[in-house]
Amino acid sequence: MQGRHEPETSLMPTPDAPGIYDRLHEEDEFEWAEPGARTDYELALGQVILAYNALDYRLSYLLACIDIELKTRTPESMSGPFGTRLDAIDLVRATAPKLAHLYQLDLEHLRELHHHRNMVTHGHYDGHPFDGSHKLYRWKKEGPRSIEGYSTARLVDIRDQLRVVLRTMDSILLWFEFDDLDAEDAGSAQSGL
């Protein structure tokens, strides 16, 4: 039929045409990437999110313990953004010498882990259907932008870093629960967790 316009091939399906991936599945002449690559990434991402959530919860709990210890009430610092809560801990460290054990927390490292968490949880995963590679994208005003450096192995590394921070956080929280412990006792308890 003359004059009929064929829809443009698109990666995404539209009402007028299936996406290229839909047609490729139908033709079955292509060698597809190992489906485990995406599954491994999803597992690592889920573990990062869960470890971060545990850290986020403990951070609020730590601030509640600080308030009790110092006999203050600063609820805005407990429920505010992650960075604001870190600022509150930094302020306490500078003004309450009896809570010197809070220096065990590397606040800059926590900020870095928070940044990584934001990048991977708000990034869009786009896996290549044939070679198993993937990219993360974030939407900016100018359009999608590729985010580099977040392989499955990198996510596992971030998860492991979060778990180390959680053990440190747990040893600090032990001090509040058993304030008669000295720093050496808390360190021994940390290594046993």
Image: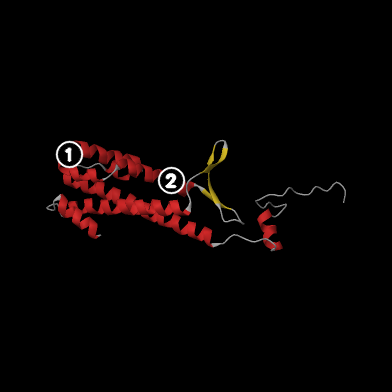
Judging from the image, what secondary structure is the residue with disc 1 in? loop
- Check disc 1 and give the amino acid type: Ala
Residue on which disc 1 sits: 96
Quarter containing the C terminus:
bottom left
Cα–Cα gap, marks 1 and 2: 31 Å
Along the line of sight, the residue nearer the viewer: 59 or 136: 136
Q: Is residue 175 left or right of residue 158?
A: left
Q: Residue 44 at x, y = what percent? A: 44, 57
Q: Residues within 10 Å of mark 1 (few under 14, many from 20)?
A: few
Observer-nearest of 147 and 117 = 147
Could you tell me if residue 29 is visible in this image? Answer: yes
Number of marks in the image?
2
Corner quadrant of residue 25: bottom right
Colouring scheme applied when the structure was drawn = secondary structure
Identity, as a three-letter code, of the amino acid under mark 2: Asn
Quarter holding residue 102? top left
Q: Earlier in the sequence, mark 1 or mark 2?
A: 1
Q: Position of residue 56 (x, y in %)?
A: 33, 49
Q: Residue at x 30, y 42 (%)?
A: 107
Residue 79 numbered tag: none
Q: Which residue is mark 2?
A: 118
Give how far across and how far down residue 163 sits, in percent: 33, 54
Q: Residue at x 41, y 57 (%)?
A: 47
Which residue is depicted at the point 43% across and 45% down? 118
From the top left corner, tell me how far across and down residue 76 is, in percent.
Answer: 30, 41
